Image (cartoon, rainbow, N blue to C red):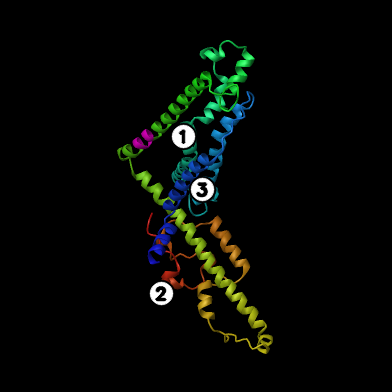
Amino acid sequence: MDRFRMIFQYFQSNSESVMNGICGLLALASVKMYTSFDFSCPCLPQYNMAYGLGIMFVPPIILFLCGLILNRQSLVMLEEWRRPPGHRKKDLAVIRYMCSSIMQRAMVAPVVWIIVTLLDGKCLICAFSGSMDPQKFVGFANVSTVQAQQLLAKVPCKDEELMRNTTSRKAVTRYLRCWSQALGWSILLILIIAAFLARWLRPCFNQATLLQARHWSNYIDIEQKIFEETCCEHSRLFAHKCILHFFESMRQELKLHSFSLPREGEGDEEGEDLLQGITDQDQVNKLLKTWYYEKPPLDVSQAHQRHPLVRERSPLPWADNTSTHSKFPQHTNV
């Protein structure tokens, strides 16, 4: 059980591993979807191309959008791009790095779908069977142009009586499948070569900019997580205090029903410390607005210079109390 907990904590703290896992699952899902899909070409000249190309390119668009939606960093990147500068300037190199990373992961599943469809060949046969030159095939050379187009459109339907076990249909099918598989393997080869060159030529260039962009993109993600977790902790304590105040206001009525209430002042000191003096809705709204418009600069040496909103408040309780360190996640990877 401890081992599973450690694995869960690792993936929870490592967004890159989570996104890689989601990317792999989407790729496997695309293959499973295609293999379980019942491909039925309409075998009509005016619909074959639309159906074949639609099956080839519409699902990749859906998978691409799913990859963007499931990737948490896409929202973080958009927030970083659109946020006001405030006390912290925006680094376009970091935003470009995040966008590139998001796009690369989102494109894996669509590319897998397209390559699988090309290697299978059914979509290309359905889409372009009606576009073939009838003069290149013996069975279609002695018929009119309209009849040839109708017969070519029925090539993907091997159960049609007119095309069943005909040599011409098999020739057109082999010809288009050959081109489809050649295109699929060519795309796969180009992608592998591009990945190989990107991996092995990267050390030949200056790594400082890449390391900086990767570091600060991870920092933005971790900072957002810690802020959300801290807000959740504050909300829990805020709700706890509101409920206690409600119970205090009804103490006399609750005593008649034999409810045991905490004594006055019990836990108040600890709750006030954890709430950091933010004890009403207006203060919370002002704090959240200040975080959005005026994020603190990336300089921890200025930590002693408090923001005006929290200048008169007590220091953070976890700054001097080691027992509270376990309440917040420890992020060490960048």
Give coordinates of residue 22: x percent, y percent.
Answer: 47, 49
Please tell me the numbered disc located at residue 115: 1
**Mark 1–mark 2 CB contact (< 8 Å):** no
Give coordinates of residue 40: x percent, y percent.
Answer: 59, 33
Please tell me the numbered disc located at residue 74: 3
Mark 2 and mark 3: Cα distance apart in space: 35 Å
Give coordinates of residue 49: x percent, y percent.
Answer: 59, 27
Q: What range is drawn magenta here?
A: 192-197
Q: Amino acid at mark 2?
A: Ser
Residue at point 50% right, 75% down?
273
- In the image, taking residue 253 as reference, residue 170 lies left or right, namely left
Magenta-span inclusion, residue 5 = no
Residue at point 63% right, 79% down?
245
Q: Which residue carries the number 2 mark?
A: 323
Please tell me the numbered disc located at residue 269: none
Give coordinates of residue 325: x percent, y percent.
Answer: 41, 70
Mark 1 and mark 3: Cα distance apart in space: 26 Å
Q: What secondary structure do most residues of the magenta stretch adopt?
A: helix
179 vs 307, nearest the viewer: 179
| Disc 1 versus disc 2: nearer the observer | 1
